[in-house]
Amino acid sequence: MKREYKGTIIEESLEDNRVLNKLDIRKLRVTKERNPADRWHLFSVFVTKKEIIKFSKKIKQGWYMHFWKRREVIVIFKNKRFEFDYDNKESWKPAIEYGISLGIPKKQLDFPIDRTNY
């Protein structure tokens, strides 16, 4: 099982955070909000495409995750998945429009990718 896709999982977006126990976690970052209840826990991970598909069933409604392998991007929402070429911004439109329809601000639907190995 080769974990080729990189991504960041926000623990607070998960219906059950125990799914993190089985992942290849490379880094954890906690946001710096003053109130601990407002902080997000961001896990940098490597995952398989099969794991990504499973996450779409475990993510809370109104949240999204995205993963990438080179320039191939997979964006998941609750029970919904979009795949596109990072360099073809036109191919992003269905994922962005769907995210906006859920109330996610457009500025948060930017799907950044990182080429480092964490």
Image (tube, rainbow, N blue to C red):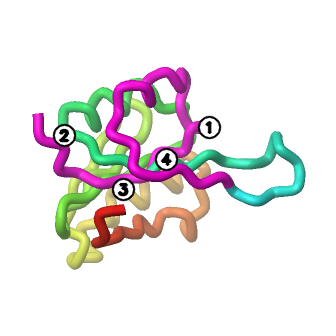
Residue type (three-letter) at the residue carrying disc 1: Glu
Measuring 43% from the left and 58% from the top, which residue is drawn there? 97
Magenta stretch: includes residue 26: yes
Residue type (three-letter) at the residue carrying disc 4: Phe
Q: Is residue 36 left or right of residue 71?
A: right
Give the CA separation, mark 1 to mark 2.
21 Å
The answer to which of 4 and 13 lies nearer the viewer is 4
Expressed as whole percent of the image width and height from the top left, the position of residue 47 reads: 26, 42
Q: Would you call the spot at circle 1 few (<14 residues within 10 Å), some (14-19), or many (20 or more)?
A: some
Measuring 32% from the left and 58% from the top, which residue is drawn there? 94
User: Which residue is denoted by mark 4 in the rendering?
Assistant: 43
User: Which residue is denoted by mark 3 in the rendering?
Assistant: 95
The answer to which of 55 and 40 lies nearer the viewer is 40
Give the CA separation, mark 2 to mark 3.
18 Å
Q: Is residue 94 above or below residue 11?
A: below
The answer to which of 108 and 51 lies nearer the viewer is 51
Expressed as whole percent of the image width and height from the top left, the position of residue 118 reads: 37, 62
Measuring 36% from the left and 43% from the top, which residue is drawn there? 76
Circle nearer the viewer, 2 or 3:
2
Q: Which residue ends up furthest to the right in the rendered image?
A: 35
Q: Would you call the spot at circle 3 few (<14 residues within 10 Å), some (14-19), or many (20 or more)?
A: many
Return the mark for residue 49. Answer: 2
Q: Give the image quarter of residue 56.
A: top left
Give the CA separation, mark 1 to mark 4.
11 Å
User: Which residue is denoted by mark 1 in the rendering?
Assistant: 12
Residue type (three-letter) at the residue carrying disc 3: Ala
Magenta stretch: includes residue 25: yes
Give the CA separation, mark 3 to mark 4.
22 Å
